[in-house]
């Protein structure tokens, strides 16, 4: 099971990977980062990524109950990941679900020409499930 450093290094093996970070989206702090920062420096990028994640995770427009009453009252379907596209890249934010700490995410920045968004979503899901905090 990979720790933060191993998780980030594995994320960087994806085609087109430019940068990756594990971010505590409650505080906006990067717990680890590799590669190029998307926003100038890793700390700024982590804070801005956390702000976007909080909006998606906390607002009912994105976490509304499943149609047909599949969820409990007042319990929505949790956001799994966010994809932001630009002319030159993709930003994939994958939430890491934990029993004790559910405020982590993996942020992967991919080059649009070389990256494979579908593969990245699958691999980040796997990494998020296996991530161990030491």
Image (cartoon, rainbow, N blue to C red):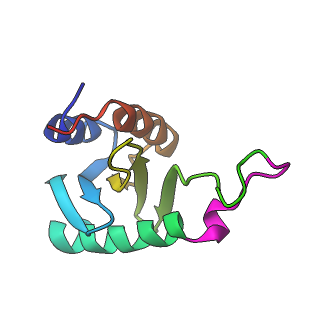
Question: Residue 62 placed where, x, y %?
Answer: 62, 64
Question: Residue 8 placed where, x, y %?
Answer: 22, 42
Residue 9 seen from this side: yes
Quarter where residue 44 is shown? bottom left
Q: Which image quadrant: the N terminus?
A: top left
Q: Nearer the viewer, residue 50 or 27?
A: 27
Question: Residue 49 placed where, x, y %?
Answer: 34, 68
**Majority secondary structure in the magenta region:** loop
Q: Which residues are magenta?
A: 59-69
Q: Nearer the viewer, residue 74 or 81?
A: 74
Q: How many marks?
A: 0
Residue at image coords 29%, 47%: 17
Residue at image coords 35%, 56%: 103
Q: Is residue 66 left or right of residue 76?
A: right
Residue 39 seen from this side: no
Quarter where residue 19 is shown? bottom left
């Amino acid at each position: 099971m990979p720790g933060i450093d191993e998780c980030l290094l594995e994320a960087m093996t994806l085609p087109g990977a430019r940068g990756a970070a594990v971010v505590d989206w409650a505080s906006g702090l990067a717990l680890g980062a590799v590669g190029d920062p998307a926003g100038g420096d890793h700390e700024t990028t982590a804070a801005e990524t956390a702000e976007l994640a909080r909006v998606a995770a906390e607002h009912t427009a994105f976490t509304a109950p499943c149609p047909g009453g599949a969820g409990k009252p007042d319990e929505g379907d949790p956001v799994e990941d966010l994809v932001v596209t630009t002319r030159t890249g993709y930003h994939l934010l994958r939430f890491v679900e934990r029993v004790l700490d559910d405020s982590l995410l993996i942020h992967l920045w991919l080059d649009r020409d070389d990256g494979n968004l579908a593969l990245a979503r699958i691999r980040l899901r796997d990494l998020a499930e296996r991530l161990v905090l030491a």
